[in-house]
Image (cartoon, grey):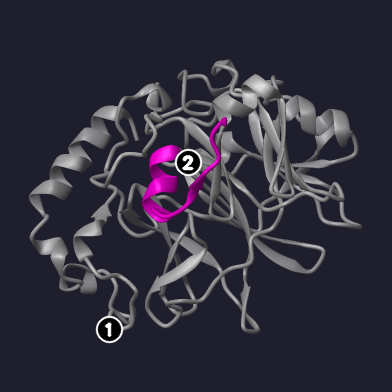
């Protein structure tokens, strides 16, 4: 979606504001969703992102290449890395996730959903099992606080991607377990995992490798977002590292390279391109790679998201600022 399309979607959402105050607006499109069961208190928060249900097609059971055979990715291009003990490490390029947002996969018997919301820069990987039921996820086409609302095909419930939580339908209140994955450059992945695997290009007619949100992370305000801006003078589209309900500004981490606080060690290293800067993702400005570990050196679940999104979903969260 180009920025002009984002403006058009924003105008359409504002025009439909009064209708969006009730779930009745969505029932025709979602006849199997239980709208009576929900944690949403104000339906004005739910906006259409433009595409309809499945208009952004999730990927199921992707194909993989040996990392050494991949020739399309630039060295600084971002990938989401998933490393499961005893399994070949896998890289999921953001050049594909930008256009599909969800990949339903299985690694070592663990059903996973690898997700990326471009409007929040939120790249999270979840275990797809909930109370013994294996779910598969699609893109609803709806946004809340500019963040993607996923849905599961089994119950047609809606899920907030940034939270990994069911918000509408039978699965309201259910939580997905987040796995400790991270975003890094393709060069970093292949240097550490020369025998790794990389998701192959999906068989869709998309401009893979091109960023449809040119200069988005340099914008002064987020699109399709009407909530409060972050406190402490932090720019709304500044990146922060979220661990639980705490957020470390990436700029602080960039200046220090390593920060250890509250039992968490965060590191920053140059070399990863922003997926939301230049038209060619491989040429995006350097935003660095972040790793988050506990005191024993184990990778921790986290997110590198925009500050406005952290404030929207964790309004009482702790901002880990330089003292």
In the displayed structure image, the side of residue 312 where residue 65 appears, left or right: right
Residue beneath the point at 89% across and 33% down: 194
Q: Nearer the viewer, residue 273 or 208?
A: 273
Q: What residue span does the magenta drawing correspond to?
A: 307-323
Magenta span includes 7? no
Q: Quadrant of residue 104?
A: bottom right
Residue bearing mark 2:
99
Q: Which one is in front in this view, the residue at disc 2 or the one at disc 1?
A: 1
Residue 70: x %, y % from top left = 76, 30
Figure check: 53 above or below 63: below
Residue beneath the point at 67% across and 53% down: 301
Residue bearing mark 1:
36
Q: Secondary structure at mark 1?
A: loop
Figure check: 162 above or below 257: below
Magenta span includes 322? yes
Residue 187: x %, y % from top left = 77, 25
- For the N terminus, the image quarter is top left
Residue 156: x %, y % from top left = 41, 75
- For the C terminus, the image quarter is top right
Few, some or many C-alpha atoms within 10 Å of disc 2 (few <14, some 14-19, many ≥20)? many
Residue beneath the point at 16% across and 62% down: 20
Q: Tell me the CA gap for discs 2 and 1.
A: 32 Å
Few, some or many C-alpha atoms within 10 Å of disc 1 (few <14, some 14-19, many ≥20)? few
In the displayed structure image, the side of residue 87 where residue 315 appears, left or right: left
Figure check: 167 above or below 230: below
Q: Quadrant of residue 183?
A: top right
In the displayed structure image, the side of residue 100 where residue 48 appears, left or right: left
Q: Secondary structure at mark 2?
A: helix
Residue beneath the point at 90% across and 39% down: 195
Q: Residue furthest front?
A: 323
Residue 280: x %, y % from top left = 51, 19
Total number of numbered discs in the rendering:
2
């Amino acid at each position: 979606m180009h920025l002009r399309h984002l403006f058009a979607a924003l105008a359409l959402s504002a025009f439909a504001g009064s209708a969006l105050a009730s779930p009745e607006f969505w029932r025709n499109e979602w006849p199997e969703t239980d709208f009576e069961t929900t944690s949403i208190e104000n339906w004005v928060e739910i906006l259409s992102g433009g595409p309809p249900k499945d208009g952004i097609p999730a990927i199921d059971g992707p194909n993989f290449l040996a990392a050494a055979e991949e020739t399309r990715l630039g060295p600084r291009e971002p990938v989401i890395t998933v490393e499961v003990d005893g399994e070949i490490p896998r890289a999921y390029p953001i050049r594909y996730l930008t256009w599909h947002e969800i990949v339903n996969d299985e690694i070592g018997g663990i059903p996973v959903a690898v997700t990326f919301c471009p409007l929040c820069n939120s790249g999270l990987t979840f275990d797809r099992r909930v109370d013994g039921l294996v779910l598969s996820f699609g893109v609803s086409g709806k946004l809340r606080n500019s963040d993607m609302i996923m849905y599961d095909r089994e119950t047609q419930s809606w899920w907030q991607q940034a939270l990994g939580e069911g918000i509408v339908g039978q699965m309201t209140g259910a939580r997905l377990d987040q796995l400790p994955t991270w975003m890094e450059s393709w060069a970093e992945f292949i240097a550490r995992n020369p025998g790794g695997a990389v998701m192959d290009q999906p068989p869709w007619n998309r401009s893979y490798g091109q960023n449809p949100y040119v200069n988005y992370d340099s914008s002064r305000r987020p699109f399709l977002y009407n909530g409060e801006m972050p406190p402490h003078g932090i720019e709304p589209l500044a990146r922060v590292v979220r661990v639980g309900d705490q957020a470390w500004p990436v700029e602080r981490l960039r200046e220090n390279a390593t920060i250890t606080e509250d039992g968490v060690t965060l590191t920053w290293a140059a070399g990863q391109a922003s997926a939301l800067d230049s038209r060619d993702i491989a040429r995006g400005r350097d935003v660095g790679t972040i790793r988050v570990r506990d005191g024993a050196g184990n990778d921790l679940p986290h997110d590198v998201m925009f500050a406005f999104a952290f404030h929207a979903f964790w309004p009482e969260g702790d901002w880990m600022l330089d003292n």
